Image (spheres, coloured by chain):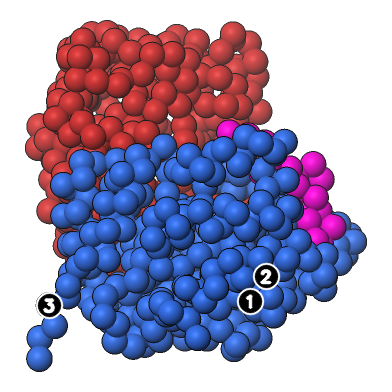
Chain colours: A blue, B red
């Protein structure tokens, strides 16, 4: 029994006494306590692969910021690595794959991750679960197949992901084989996360917006569907960042919550909610650079526009590392104190 | 009198015998002839600032690809430079400003470009105009104020432009002063381009999509309006890449053509056309990596969906440098050969 299950209720579009809130990247560089742990290890990957440390930084924002959910500290690229494609994280540069996927043969060499390869994540989840002691829900997560493919083909971040998009156009069969292997790996991974204690899951499709609606229909959605249809133990949040073109199709997806960013309109949100989806988001993370007066006003406006039912307050992207901590607190506190005006 | 004024007719939503076509970045690395000229000089900026060379590469795609318009070979960052903020272009990295804008004082130090600072662009336009000999229209261009601000504050390209967005939230007055100076500089610059022979103008708002609708309404649109209202000599194409959230407001803008990318829906396009705007775009440049059979099919589908009136065929972004030239030809030729089925 969770003491605070506001997020699970909001995900189910049930009435809540207030809108729940957490922040993408809440465990991270905004917290001095995180930076201290981070500076004690050789690299980001050591944090990710050491369950005690991953647990520690996962819990930090729960205690310090009072958010309504913890999200396991990890990285979406652990799945490609478990499939046989190791990655590195270069400070201030981002992820780097030394080998990339270029052909059908490369895809065939990859294995479907069975789950146990990522035991360190499950160990971290179990530690967090124990530490949380049922105070709030714990969110597990994974990258969406298209987003993982884009890194595996591109080898690193990109403004256009034109190499990954070229792969879809030039080698569609290899792309489908890869997406299917990623989806199967992800299902195994997420099922193991549930077994380890995850109360909810988020699927990050960070690069959804670089595809056209037509391409997303072929290379994005079917694999999200496969994952969502395989998991019915816990609620799923699907976050196809910026891909507003696919909102209508997302209504049919077998998930409870759709993540949106600051480019989603009030009408978009209402339409998703009317179709039975809860919506997570959508505050502009750059908005947390404003004065606290402006932040409070902005957060209140968002809450009013999203309504009292079917909304999990969050940013539309990870919190930026140099955001003043007091501004983050102001955002969270404003949401926790807000009283929706409900007409009766 | 232009021999081929299809683009001007399409911009005015007049009937045309076929849909006109040109490509963003048609003068560039897709052409071996361009690469030859490029390798003969020390850097990209030498090409931009040497009128004879800029003219040569501007004309290349006209002769080689048979497009329906030439666009002057230049860079949007010449305007910040004319205002007092010099830039460099680092091969394979992109633009770099050694000094960036951080404060109101920095903005105050900048001058409004009067126009003559960029004489090399007008000289290039005049040479191109002469070389074209009225075969097809010549397009001039500039960056939109928000996009130029984002480079001037950020100093370089970015995935999030969070530093530029922080500037808007933390120093809105300085931002407005800067945007206004950029808009005034741009008006002077574009008027001089018209005097030098530009038959049409395009304003690139390449980073429009990173702003929220609310922010774009405050920091983007008013300065596009200022520019569009100051220029009535030639048609203007406004291209706020990916910012589909602003389509409704763009209908009111005093310009003839709206550029769209591959995320714009058929409904978006129809709505803009119904409001009297011509639409430019919207083919996915990664689609030119597909087989020529697929490209021909895709181009035909686009033409059918955009209709016979009020459409300038183009990509939704600059053509990627490694696109096979025969694929580019296939796209252009398919469009030029397409016969719209017009119901009578």
Q: Is mark 3 on a helix, strand or loop?
A: loop
Residue at 73% across, 45% down:
A46
Q: Give the labeled residue for mark 1.
A: A197
Please say whether residue A260 is visible from this viewpoint: no
Chain of the residue under label 3: A
Q: Toward the viewer: A164 or B306?
A: A164
Question: Do the numbered discs 2 and 3 sit on residues whose CB atoms are within 8 Å?
Answer: no
Image vertical order of residue A339 relative to residue B207, above or below: below
Image vertical order of residue A182 relative to residue B29, above or below: below
Q: Give the range drawn in magenta.
A: A79-102
Q: Label 2, label 3: how many angstroms apart (C-alpha)?
A: 39 Å
- Estimate the x, y position of residue A165 in percent, counting from the top left: 62, 55
The disc at residue A126 is 2
Q: Earlier in the sequence, mark 2 or mark 3?
A: 2
- Disc tally is 3
Task: Decide: few, some or many residues near mark 2? Use Cα within 10 Å; few <14, some 14-19, many ≥20.
Answer: some
Residue at 78% across, 56% down:
A81
């Amino acid at each position: 029994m969770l003491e605070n299950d506001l997020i699970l209720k909001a995900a189910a579009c049930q009435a809540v006494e207030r809108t729940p809130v957490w922040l993408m990247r809440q465990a991270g560089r905004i917290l001095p306590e995180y930076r201290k742990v981070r500076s004690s290890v050789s690299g980001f990957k050591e944090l990710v692969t050491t369950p005690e440390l991953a647990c520690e930084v996962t819990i930090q924002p729960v205690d310090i910021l009072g958010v309504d959910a913890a999200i396991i500290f990890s990285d979406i690229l652990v799945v490609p690595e478990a499939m046989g494609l190791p990655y590195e994280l270069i400070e201030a540069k981002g992820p780097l794959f030394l080998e990339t996927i270029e052909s059908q043969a490369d895809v065939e060499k990859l294995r479907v991750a069975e789950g146990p390869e990522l035991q360190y994540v499950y160990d971290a989840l179990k530690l967090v679960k124990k530490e949380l002691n049922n105070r709030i829900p714990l969110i597990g997560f994974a990258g969406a197949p298209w987003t993982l493919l884009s890194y595996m083909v591109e080898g690193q971040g990109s403004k256009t992901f034109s190499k990954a998009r070229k792969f879809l156009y030039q080698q569609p069969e290899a792309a489908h084989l890869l997406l299917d292997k990623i989806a199967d790996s992800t299902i195994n991974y997420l099922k193991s996360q549930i077994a380890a204690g995850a109360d909810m899951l988020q699927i990050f499709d960070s690069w959804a917006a670089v595809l056209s609606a037509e391409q997303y229909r072929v290379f994005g959605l079917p694999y999200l569907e496969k994952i969502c249809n395989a998991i019915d133990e816990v609620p799923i949040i699907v976050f196809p960042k910026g891909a507003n073109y696919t909102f209508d199709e997302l209504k049919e997806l077998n998930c409870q919550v759709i993540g949106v960013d600051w480019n989603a309109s009030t009408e978009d949100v209402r339409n998703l909610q009317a179709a039975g989806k809860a919506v997570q988001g959508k505050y502009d993370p750059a908005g947390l650079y404003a004065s606290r007066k402006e932040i409070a006003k902005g957060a209140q406006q968002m809450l009013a526009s999203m309504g009292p039912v079917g909304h999990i307050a969050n940013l539309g992207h990870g919190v930026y590392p140099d955001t003043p901590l007091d501004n983050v607190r102001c955002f969270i506190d404003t949401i926790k104190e807000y009283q929706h005006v409900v007409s009766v």
